[in-house]
Amino acid sequence: MKQIALAALLGAGCSGAALAQSTVQIYGVADAGVMWQRGGTTKIISGGADGSRLGFKGSEELGGGYKAVFNIEARVELDTGLQFPTILNDKQGLYLTRGMDLLPPAVLQAVRGATQPPGGLAVNPQKALFDRTSMVGMITPYGAFLLGRLYTPEYEVFAAADTFEAGTAGTWGGILYGTGGYTVIPSDIRSSRSLEYRIVHPSGFGAVLMVSSKGSGYLERYNKFYGVNVTYKNRGWDVGIGYNHGYDQQDAPSLRTATAGGSWSWGDYRFFAGVHYERNTNSPLMQDYILGWDSLVAPQLAPLGAATAGFLRNVFIRNIFANTEQNAISVQAGVQYRYGPGKILASVAHQNDRTSGDSDATLYALGYDYFVSRRTDLYAVGAFIDNRKWAQFSPASGGVPGGFTRHPGDNGGALQVGIRHRF
């Protein structure tokens, strides 16, 4: 997640070369390790610190300060060779069925399987070939114009504020998926069908504006989407503020997220801090959940009669609508310290759930990243999550959500070691 190749691509700036020059680069990350989760199993995982990937990017100098650019990047799961990983454990998330006690036990179990199947796809449910990035655009003397599937403005700020750089069991995002589970996303990391305008001033100030059409957002469910950020990257500072806003299929306001924060370097230390806000009262996934009921559950209720089946369907819809609501504020602070041929990382993050579930969580993480060479590093991280009430967070990784603890309120924990090679 954390390596936003687009930023590096645009960072090259513009050239006034008289003769057109074209370059194409193949690049990637190979990252795998071993992860133990509290109450779960020990397993080989891909993308512990960084989502494994294979990418292609290139540019052509057109002269006069103009440059054509492209970037396509595919997800690669080293443990299986696939491109659509499942969550890190198969425990059942229960929050989505909160308040559905009127449903018969067999029906309730069917609902849980339909809305949030254990072992279900956690990332890239579209099974896209180039899920991570797919864009083409033009850098001009007046800014960059880009088209395709791109990182969103708010997420760029969020990733810059994460002490664990959006990776390993210590990533801040591990407690932001909401008690509704991993399908209730806390932030649109990328958006499909997007047009983006970017500017960077020599002083270090920059800004991004994104607008997206129907079928946009991370899960491609929005009727429309927009995002904006303002950043400053200079004199040891990498800070910003960003905002995203999606609209559901009926054009009602859906997920709104805002992040402010970043980092500051001082000698061997780099300090991180951030605050994240998420609000959603019209989940674009409601259609998926209702379809799951109608196709997988309703046929089992036919023998009960139309009146009973209709009553139980209303119980489901009323509660699933309430349980997909998001209203939370999260804060995170941490530090990286250069020690020997590597760095020590430590952070604390807290999620304040302001919905009726009031299910807060606090994440504590400590790790060490050892640089074997410029391209290869070894990492070890330990993380602990203090879950309250309905919260079931289990530590995540750089490429996949962690999933759930066995029961609501159970604490989550994980140890993770791995190797990452960049090429």
Image (cartoon, helix red, strand yellow):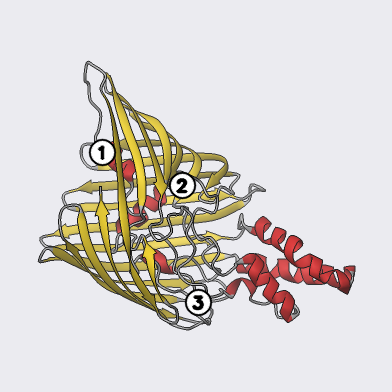
Q: Residues within 10 Å of mark 3 (few under 14, many from 20)?
A: many
In depth, the one of 352 and 125 nearer the eye is 125
Which residue matches tag 2? 131
The answer, for residue 337, to whether it is visible in the render is no
Query: Which residue sits furthest top?
Result: 18
Find residue 388 and name its label: none
* Residue 81 lies in quadrant: bottom left
Query: Disc 2 versus disc 1: distance between alpha carbons?
Result: 22 Å
* Residue 172 lies in quadrant: bottom left
Query: Disc 1 versus disc 3: distance between alpha carbons?
Result: 40 Å
Determine contact: label 2, label 1, CB under 8 Å. no
In the rendered structure, which amino acid carries the disc numbered 1? Answer: Gly
Looking at the rendered image, the quarter that the N terminus falls into is bottom left
Which residue matches tag 3? 391
Which residue matches tag 1? 11
| Left/right of residue 220 with respect to residue 11 in the rendered view | right
Determine contact: label 3, label 2, CB under 8 Å. no
| Residue beneath the point at 48% across and 44% down | 129
Q: Residues within 10 Å of mark 2 (few under 14, many from 20)?
A: many
Percent x, y of residue 84:
49, 55
In the rendered structure, which amino acid carries the disc numbered 2? Answer: Asp
| Residue beneath the point at 83% across and 67% down | 310
In depth, the one of 255 and 89 nearer the eye is 89
Sequence-wise, the earlier of marks 3 and 2 is 2
Query: Which residue sits furthest front?
Result: 80
Determine contact: label 1, label 3, CB under 8 Å. no
Q: Residues within 10 Å of mark 1 (few under 14, many from 20)?
A: few
Percent x, y of residue 288:
66, 57
